[in-house]
Structures are given as structure tokens and as C-alpha cells.
Amino acid sequence: MAASDIISRARLRAGLTQGGLAHLAGTSRPTLSAYERGRKSPTLDTAARIVGEAGFDLSLDQRITFVECPAGRGRSALVPTALPRLSVDEALRVVALPLRVSWSDPGRRFDLRDRRQRARLYERVVREGAPEDVLAFIDGALLVDLWNDLVLPAAVRTAWESTLPVLKRDE
């Protein structure tokens, strides 16, 4: 993600105007605008200061890649190399899955604040989801909490557990 996107996202999520964030960060509105439009590039320290004044931190997040694992009956599962994390707002929102994941119940909405509905959505995404679905809908901590309660084909469960040992069943 470019510095321009990071600064703009932080400002918008904080509900600040360019002028308001510029004032807090000790810079001018035209300079902040130039950063957001990519016409100027702030140093890392400057970007951290501006984002910090919006109430956020710059951080490193592990890049998640996907590994193809056998999932039985000639199928394979794409399993993440690390568990994704979502913001609280993203992890506990109301969503409808794309048709490719929820083909048997198109348009169904899941309230992820409800543990049972979240479990049903996670089952579908783990079984049928593409990498973009896993990253968009699954929070790793909530998945670990639900893991032993999810109804999954044994081969799919084994594929995920072999790549993400934190998910192993407690026996």
C-alpha cells in the first residue's frame, strides 16, 4: 500500500478533514493533499507522525500466502500460511458471501456477531472459499476459537491443520 493510501485511509477513518489532520500533524493542508494524491512522498517518519495524529500506528503485518494442499476426492484446498486478522468492525459485521462460496443459499446474510452464524460462514469459506474470501471474511483468533466446533470434511480439516498447527484438535 502506498503512503498516499495509508495517509488518506487514516484521515478518513478518523473522520478528519485534510485541514484538520494537517493542523494536528503540524503541516499545511496543501502538503497533506500532495501526500494523499501521491504528488509528494513523505519520509517514513513524516508518514508515521501524520498517521499517528489521526490515531493510528504504522505497523508491519505478515504477508499471507496460500499453499495448495490435498483435500480428498481429487480436490485441493488453498490454505493460508498464517491466520489473517480483521479489525473488530470487519470481523463482527453482517455479510453476504459471494455466489462462488454460497451457491446453495445465494444472498443469505450472516451476522458475524452471532457465534453460530459465524461458524456456518467460516465452514463455507474454509471449504469453498478462494484466498480473497479467507482474507475478507475470516479472523484468525475467531477461527481458532471455533475450530473444534466447525463441521468440516476430514481432509479439509487435515489440510488446514497441517499448514496452521495452532488449529490442531485438542484430543
Image: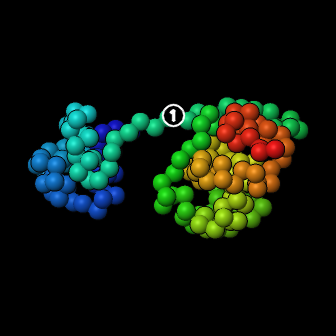
Residue 29 is left or right of residue 99, and the answer is left
Query: At x 53% / y 47%, what residue is drawn?
Result: 85
Residue 16 in picture, x, y percent from top left: 24, 60
Residue 65 lies in what quarter of the image? top right
Q: Residue lying furthest right in this view?
A: 73
Nearest to the observer: residue 34 or residue 134: 134
Q: In this view, does 29 lie to the left or right of 66?
A: left
Residue at point 21% right, 60% down? 17
Q: Give the image location of residue 139, x and y in percent.
A: 58, 51
Q: Label 1: which residue?
A: 63
As drawn, is 1 to the left or to the right of 70?
Answer: left
Residue at 64 percent across and 68 percent down: it is 114
Residue furthest out toward the front: 171
Where on the picture, by quarter, is residue 49?
A: top left
SS for callout 1: loop
Residue 81 falls in which quadrant of the image? top right
Residue 167: percent from the left, percent from the top?
70, 42
